[in-house]
Amino acid sequence: MKRSPKSCGVWTPDSEHTYTRKRVNRADAWNRGSLRAFAAWLRSSRGLQPGSVTVRMGSACTFVDAVATQSGRSCAMAFRLLTCVEIEDFFVDYAKKQGKAGLRSMQAAMRLFLRFAASRGWVGLELVQAVPSQRSYRLSHLPRGVSDAHLLKLLESRWETGQSGRRDRAIVYLLATYGIRRGQLSALKLTDIDWHAKTIRFAAHKGGKEIRHGLTDACAQVMAEYLRRERQPSESEFVFLRGRRPYVRLSPAAISEVVRAWTVRCGIAPYYPHVFRHAFASRLLRARQPAKTISDLLGHRSLDAVGIYAKVDHARLLEASVEWPEASS
């Protein structure tokens, strides 16, 4: 009996909903109804995309199960009895086993669930403020981009070996050339490429804007080689497919694995798709492109999103610097 793609455990455009449902089903039985309602609230009232819902639900299930277990009551009753001290105690205990990224995810999920609980009349909105905050500073970190030397090594490497070599080469070329997100590459459709006009379109992602670029000769060549000589026959409208049956769209996570595997094969430290986006923005800054242009090419709706890249534009920072005043004798 032939199994469907979903039963094979492969990624499909609807699989984020499947992952969320499976995570809720692993929660305590008396919490599942509330967690399903929370997931629906995240989609309808907060407008979160399926991938974001999946991430928030993972943390929320842990939080809700802990609160209900400690209380010995169902979700609704446990939250009616929840105190600020218990919220803080849970977060402090959770922080002992998690890094900064895990804590940020839990912090966001806790605040969202408490807002949801407040909409149900279980708690007051003041409990949202009881979730501890992590001290952080805006633009305090530096974006990590792939170096020019490593990028050249990746693009000049032999890509024809292996079952999906041409596909993987096309993936890296598009990421390096256009600075797109892995989700945008995963969602790229055959109809998004206009071969006659030499343009390529990437759908809006994470609340951003649609992006249109000119199709470079190098990208057109590697994509044509993949589509003509390697892409498996399929009715799928998406460009990048699995190399094995079932021939369905590559997930964003699979694209990350493609990049990681090829960087390691090229003898350099493992990289992931977002470093190409940082490198793309940094190249535009070095070329003295205006912030508005960079923002548009990255698909951002706000100029604030590109502010972090100003910190790596060393040439302009030197122009803005002044000599340190010396004390007069």
Image (cartoon, grey):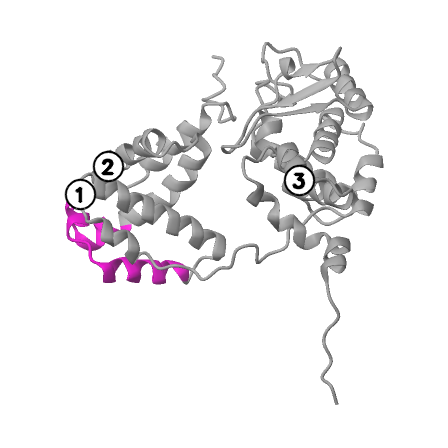
Q: Residues within 10 Å of mark 2 (few under 14, many from 20)?
A: some
Q: How many marks?
A: 3
Question: 130 above or below 257?
Answer: below
The reply to whether discs 1 and 2 touch (Cβ–Cβ < 8 Å) is yes
Q: Secondary structure at mark 1?
A: helix
Disc number placed over residue 277 in the picture, else none:
3
Residue that label 1 marks:
76
The reply to whether discs 2 and 3 touch (Cβ–Cβ < 8 Å) is no
Q: Quadrant of residue 150?
A: top right
User: Can you name the residue that lies furthest to the front here?
Assistant: 328
In this rendering, does residue 305 appear at all? yes
Please, what is the dominant secondary structure of the magenta stretch? helix
Question: 177 above or below 87?
Answer: above
Q: Quadrant of residue 281?
A: top right
The residue range painted magenta reads 66-95
Question: 291 above or below 171?
Answer: below
Mark before the other along the chain sequence, 1 or 3 = 1
Of the residues shown, which amino acid type is indicated by label 1? Ala
Q: Which residue is depicted at the point 71% across and 43% down?
A: 279
Expressed as whole percent of the image width and height from the top left, the position of residue 134 reads 43, 60
Q: Nearer the viewer, residue 244 or 126?
A: 126
Residue that label 2 marks:
34
Mark before the other along the chain sequence, 2 or 3 = 2
Quadrant of the image containing the C terminus:
bottom right
Q: Which residue is depicted at the point 76% across and 59% down?
A: 318
Expressed as whole percent of the image width and height from the top left, the position of residue 138 reads 52, 55
Of the residues shown, which amino acid type is indicated by label 2? Ser
- CA–CA distance in space, label 1 to label 2: 8 Å
Of the residues shown, which amino acid type is indicated by label 3? Arg
Q: Secondary structure at mark 3?
A: helix
Q: Nearer the viewer, residue 284 or 193?
A: 284
- CA–CA distance in space, label 1 to label 3: 43 Å
